[in-house]
Image (cartoon, grey):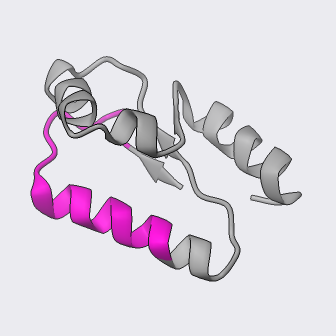
Amino acid sequence: MVDLCQATFIDSSILGAILEGRRQATEKQKGYGVACDGSSEPVNRVLDVTGLRRELPVHESVDAALEAIRQRTGSA
């Protein structure tokens, strides 16, 4: 799980790390999610413009992301 709630900026290297984390989680059949509470306009803009908000499981809080992972996989 990636927590972007406190992030104020993300760039292509961060996006690459997020996507690599998802790839590895998928390979290992583990749950994966991104927490982004919407408080940072620059982070929101990057997630929206790149289409990653739709592509990744993005949740409004860490708790919501962990709960979604638990529901999908049975564990976090």
The C terminus lies in which quarter of the figure?
bottom right
Q: Quadrant of residue 39?
A: top left
**Residue 7 on the magenta segment:** yes
Q: Quadrant of residue 31?
A: bottom right
Residue furthest to the bottom? 28
- Describe residue 17's horizontal placement relative to residue 27 as left or right: left
Instruction: Say above or below: 59 vs 69.
Output: above
Q: Position of residue 72 (x, y in %)?
A: 80, 51
Q: Position of residue 34 (x, y in %)?
A: 48, 45
Q: Position of residue 47 (x, y in %)?
A: 27, 35
The residue that appears at 18% across and 19% down in the rendered structure is 41
Q: Position of residue 18 (x, y in %)?
A: 35, 60
Q: Which residues are magenta?
A: 4-23
Q: Quadrant of residue 32?
A: bottom right
- Prevalent SS, magenta region: helix
The residue that appears at 88% across and 57% down in the rendered structure is 74
- Describe residue 27's horizontal placement relative to residue 13 as left or right: right
- Describe residue 18's horizontal placement relative to residue 33 as left or right: left
Q: Report the number of discs.
A: 0
Of residue 1 and residue 72, the one placed in the foreground of this image is 72
**Residue 5 on the magenta segment:** yes
The N terminus lies in which quarter of the figure?
bottom right
The residue that appears at 13% across and 39% down in the rendered structure is 9
Instruction: Say above or below: 16 vs 4.
Output: below
